[in-house]
Image: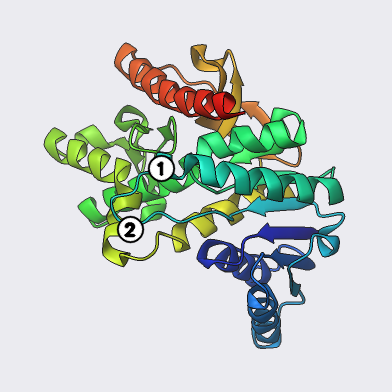
Amino acid sequence: MKITVIGAGNVGATAAQKIAYDELARDIVLVDVIEGVPQGKGLDMYQAMPVLGSDSRIIGTNSYEETADSDIVIMTAGLARKPGMSRDDLLFKNAEIVKSCIEQAYAKSPNAFFIIVSNPLDAMTYVALKATGLPRNKVIGMAGVLDTARYRTFIAMELNVSVEEVTAFVLGGHGDTMVPLPRYTTVAGVPISELIPQDRIDAIVKRTANGGAEIVNFLKTGSAYYAPSASAVEMAECIIKDKRRILPCAVQLNGEYGLSDVVCGVPIVLGKNGMESIFQIKLSAEEQAALNKSADDVKTNIAKLAAQG
């Protein structure tokens, strides 16, 4: 396997590091526009491999020549959020960055799967779909995997139990209108409504929706990167190992959940063909309305990009 990670910032470098440590790919290429940064980080990672017993080979580059024939491309490049900045504030600038990077990567690796991490996530996945012209199963956004991880973490913290016991879904756009689903959330198979008072569930749902902003406010000059990079690598692992796990990801919808012409987070079966299928669950009227609102926000961003040309 060969995996390219675009962007040698915190998210990209941490993703490349985890791929190498887990030995998910023989060759890992870290690409960035800043001269010396991907080269230095790549060499540093490579020198850790003898200690860790991994035969992954990591190179850093400012060129897409070395990315040729990648099996998976993970797109992390883009401006990071600053305090007070929403994901939507990043829309136009990051759309330019994503389009340019994806076009260059696709030209060298037309058979690759593309995992999009850049924000605003859903709109950037749409940009990548248009830039490549690939079918929707091959261009997938890392949205609900991260949001669900945050949600599961907060539930585990609330009950003081292992995060592995918590099963949950978060649907919708990767933003303030994301849709956590308490009705489908269980701990060791027990619905959380049996374990946590409703007011605490509401507080956890709200904290999940603001999970990224909470970290930005702590860091001041950056945004989250450990959990986002781990989430992207989990998606790559599902493709590499054909795990066929059901994960909430941002994909183009063509009528599923009553939504069309939009990229939105829904549960998908993720395997060797990328998105193998969309896993449809029954939503209540309230949940569907929340999902529709979240999708409408994404459509607004897509319309802004279309208007700009």
Q: Give the residue drawn at x 40%, y 22%.
A: 291
Residue 24, position in %: x, y?
A: 71, 63
Between 78 and 295, the one lying in front of the other is 78
Q: In the rendered structure, are the residues bearing label 1 and label 2 in contact, judged by CB atoms less than 8 Å apart?
A: no
Between 139 and 284, the one lying in front of the other is 139
Q: Tell me how far mark 1 sits from mark 2, CA to CA.
A: 14 Å
Q: Using the image, determine if residue 78 lies above or below residue 23.
A: above
Which circle marks residue 89 in the picture?
1
Residue 12, position in %: x, y?
A: 59, 62
Task: Name the residue tied to disc 2.
Answer: 216
Q: Tell me the element at label 1.
A: helix
Q: Give the residue drawn at x 61%, y 44%.
A: 96
Q: Using the image, determine if residue 20 lies above or below residue 65.
A: below
On the picture, is 194 further left or further right than 89?
A: left
Badge 1 amino acid: Asp
Furthest residue to the front? 308
Q: Residues within 10 Å of mark 1 (few under 14, many from 20)?
A: few
Residue 261 visible at all: yes
